[in-house]
Amino acid sequence: MLEIKDLHASINGKEILKGINLSVKPGEIHAIMGPNGSGKSTLSSVLVGNPMFEVTKGSVEFSGKDLLELSPEDRSHEGIFLSFQYPVEIPGVSMVNFMRAAVNEQRKYKELPPLSASEFLKVMREKRAIVELDSKLANRSVNEGFSGGEKKRNEIFQMAMLEPKLSILDETDSGLDIDALRIVAEGVNKLKSPENSCIVITHYQRLLDYIKPDVVHVLYNGRIVKTAGPELALELEEKGYDWIKKELGE
Amino acid sequence: MSVEQQYIDLYTQCKSMICKHSAEALNAFRDEAFSHFKSLGFPTKKLEQYKYTDLSKSFAMDYGLNLNRLDIPVNPYEVFKCDVPNMSTSLFFVVNDSFYKKELPKSNLPEGVVFSSLNDFAAEHPEVIEKYYAKLADNATDGTIAFNTTFVQDGVVLYVPKNVVVDKTIQLVNILRSDVNFMMNRRLLIILEDNAQARLLVCDHAMDPVHFLVTQVAEVYVGKNAQLDLYELEETHNNTVRVSNMFVNQEADSRLLLNNMTLHNGTTRNTTRVTLSGKGADTNVCGMAIADKSQHVDNNTFIDHAVADCTSNELFKYVLDDSAVGAFAGTILVRPDAQRTSSQQTNRNLCVTRNARMYTQPQLEIYADDVRCSHGATVGQLDENALFYMRARGIAEKEARLLLMFAFVNEVIDTVRLDALKDRLHLLVEKRFRGELNKCQGCAICK
């Protein structure tokens, strides 16, 4: 589904990703862990086409398409979704209008007719329930005045609305208390299917207690330096990253 | 020859014609206004108050004037189909600068309320003109006011007697209609006596692809505990110049909502001066401008807290595209006795391109010590993070920009206290941002 080969990317001339290779197959959950500043968020930003980052080398193929050639909106239409580490507040744009625009643009891309207002509201109600998002929040401006936990739940709600093939959760667990973490993780699990894949970027094991990864990668200094099964996450939780740095001879 | 000279000659030669078609009560002010005009001339950028807009250039063109009050062959009820759905209004027209009398709506106005031709009213009630006309608008202060008073022959008067509440919104549509470049000088006189209430929506529509120049002087008296909602909506074209001077005097406990929206224009200068002269008066002065191409919008406001315990709230927002120019200069004066004044001024602007320019100049002059005043002005671009967030959700960049611009001006539209008009404005603004408002000439949205 996703095939990343020798991906290099930089911001303001500074190289952050220095040759990433990663392959994600349908139905798989990959965890990407790593110390601060290793390039985890850069990788997620590059995958969704954030114009702040420049890809200098390498390729990314998604469902047979050259992902790097697509605009951010078309990547979304093709089925890539990023749960933002820091969801953006958009004063004056209501959640309803925002979601309706997003859903209908996706439908247009797939050559489907737009949803009627009542159909749309019905879908919205159903999906809201998945992450127990208050209907009041849905009537407010996008993320404006939302608590940290509400913002993250809102991300998963949007994911439910857009039904992506590949979801990238960028530190979705940061700033969440235990209850919110459980709700978010359960939401993600409910949306799981044999066709859909997920990349979970996190610092901690605790999210992975809920969302069980098939593969765990360690990203360090712009490269994936270790790949193993779920036991790797436990080992990292216990021992930190220093032993990996030692293995690399640093 | 100076720009002023052609008008000086015109008045000198045509004074008798102007006066012949106008009420004596209006004529009484002309000569004095003319002498002020001669000494003041048209404002240039050298004047502090006009440093963002050079009006003298706008007057240099050769315009026709209808001094002989010829009938303009137009039936506004036919050409104007811009009804706001679900809004029932008492609809009146001014064609160029003449009140349209041929066909008046069945008057549903409460007894005693007058909405009519200023010229007719001046002939019937010279004592009222004597008391209110050219009082707030001082001819000695501004060449454009003196010019208007010199040449004006008609306009509109709204008079609401004591304790009368006009429930139905009054809508006044100014139709700009001519086959040649044309100038019109019109006047608005609004008198709300104590405890009176009214809502007035004034729209400017240009119908023909010629150059128009409009001068408007409005004098607004809001009596004790009276309430006025006054909306002005400009939808003209790139060859229209609008020069508006509005003066408001508010007495004790009166409430005013002014909302001046420039949806489509050429060059617009709106001067708004509100004097809070009675305790407990409350004023809301709002405005919005959406401009592109080389359009120019300049709002100059002055709020005078002359006495204690008044509140004022100002909110202006601009969205400037292409090489449009916007200006906002807002002065708030709190006089020494105006204790417990509460005043807030906000001006926020979006420059969508690098060539768009915005000048903003907040100015607070506070001479009392027990006051609460704040002001804020920003000029910025669309929030790139928000744009990317929306694109990452599949919303095309163009659409995302529209949603953000729409959200930006919504705050001003939301001050409108008429739901039908608010809905209509949402639609108009959306059309405007989508570029659908300037596709047809004249009253584009109405066809």
Image (cartoon, coloured by chain):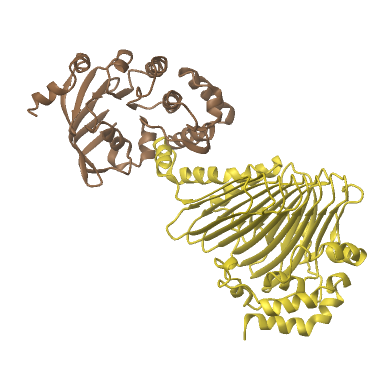
Chain colours: A brown, B yellow
Q: Residue at x 68, y 70 (%)?
A: B144
* Viewer-closest of A110 and B18: B18
Instruction: Please indicate, yes or no, whether residue A120 appears anywhere in the rendered image.
Output: no
Location of residue B173 by image quarter: bottom right
Residue B272 placement (x, y as % from top left): 67, 58
Q: Residue at x 65, y 65 (%)?
A: B242
Residue A27 placement (x, y as % from top left): 30, 20
A150 above or below B228?
Answer: above
Residue A171 placement (x, y as % from top left): 32, 26
Residue A4 placement (x, y as % from top left): 22, 33
Instruction: Give the quarter of the figure containing the N terminus of chain B.
Output: bottom right
Task: Tell whether A61 sits left or right of A187.
Answer: left
Task: Tell whether A168 sits left or right of A108.
Answer: left
Q: Residue at x 52, y 57 (%)?
A: B360
* Viewer-closest of B211 and B232: B232
Task: Tell whether B310 sits left or right of B100.
Answer: left
